Amino acid sequence: MEPSGSGLSGSGAAQGHDVDEFLDAAELFEELGFAEGVAELELGFELGGESVAQLSELKFDHDQYDQLEVGPVDLRLFRALTALGSQRMQLSDKLAFLLGSSCLCPGSFYKLYTGLGLLFFTARYATYRARKWHYYLLDLCYCCNALLLTHLWVAPRSQLLAHTTFAFNTGPLAFSILAFRNSLVYHDMDKVTSLYLHLVPACVSWAQRWHLDTSRFTPLDNTGTRVGLKQLVLIPLAFYSVWAVSYFLTIFVFAAGRIKRRGYATLFNYVTT
């Protein structure tokens, strides 16, 4: 899990925030060189009633935009940058949005989830391994997705896994969308993967609850009794405890020396620093 994307908040001004909050919406500097981007930014500030001519003299790399402090900015700047970004929308972006929005098939949604998962998780592992981030893949969200795949393809008749995955998918995973500020950007593989990781399992649970393939799966309430605290809280907590102990032993005991020596990143270090 990792945070991505942030938007404009408040009643029309962003106090003391960096330029990247606006650039993430307009995606302007990803398409332009920095010099041209500053010129566009100056135009936006003039529309907002502020002057930032001094920015043209600054030299920043693409990964240093968060160092630009701009102070109070009028909402019109945000609108101007957004308009500039929309003018440069590519055909590939439009097609990605169309195809991404068309992936709705409740009756067999779990098959779509599995196919996309193989693609996204393979790409993410390769990317994170190269960046020394692969210990992120031991985090709870990835384990919940692995548990869901186990239920779908190994033990589809298991009521225990059906209840547990439903609790995880509609609870911690769904909440992580807000906690990590996931955003839906179809042409950004990393952002799509992060949102997929947290949102799509909940969609699978919804489809399994209301559009279940009864020839393969057992309904959640098949026993005729109400599914309550034990099935949706206590049993999932037992699974969580197993993961928590395993994660602690791996990150802080068995692999602690290797992580420190090789400079591997973990979610624990990310959150605490």
Image: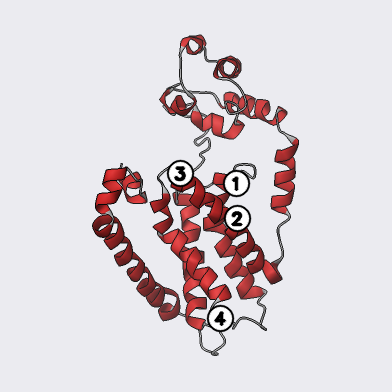
Rounded to the nearest angstrom, the CA distance separating label 4 from label 2 is 29 Å
SS for tag 1?
loop
Q: Which mark is residue 220?
A: 4
- Give x and y (percent) for residue 233: 41, 74
- Relative to the observer, which residue lies in front, 224 or 242? 242
Rounded to the nearest angstrom, the CA distance separating label 1 from label 4 is 30 Å
| Residue extending furthest toward the bottom | 224
Tag 2 or tag 4, which sits nearer the N-term? 2
Q: Which mark is residue 15?
A: none
**Mark 3 = which residue?**
130
Where, by quadrant of the figure, is residue 132 drawn?
top left
SS for tag 4?
loop
- Relative to the observer, which residue lies in front, 29 or 170? 29
SS for tag 2?
helix
Q: How many marks?
A: 4
Tag 3 or tag 4, which sits nearer the N-term? 3
SS for tag 3?
helix
Tag 1 or tag 3, which sits nearer the N-term? 3
CA neighbours of label 3 inside 10 A, class few (<14), some (14 to 19), many (20+): few
The reply to whether the C-beta atoms of the residues labelled 2 and 3 are less than 8 Å apart is: no
**Mark 1 = which residue?**
184
Rounded to the nearest angstrom, the CA distance separating label 2 from label 3 is 17 Å
**Mark 2 = which residue?**
119
Name the kind of residue labelled 1 in the image. Leu
CA neighbours of label 4 inside 10 A, class few (<14), some (14 to 19), many (20+): many
Position of 101 compared to 252: left or right?
A: right
Which residue: 73% across, 50% down? 99
- Relative to the observer, which residue lies in front, 62 or 88? 62
Tag 4 or tag 1, which sits nearer the N-term? 1
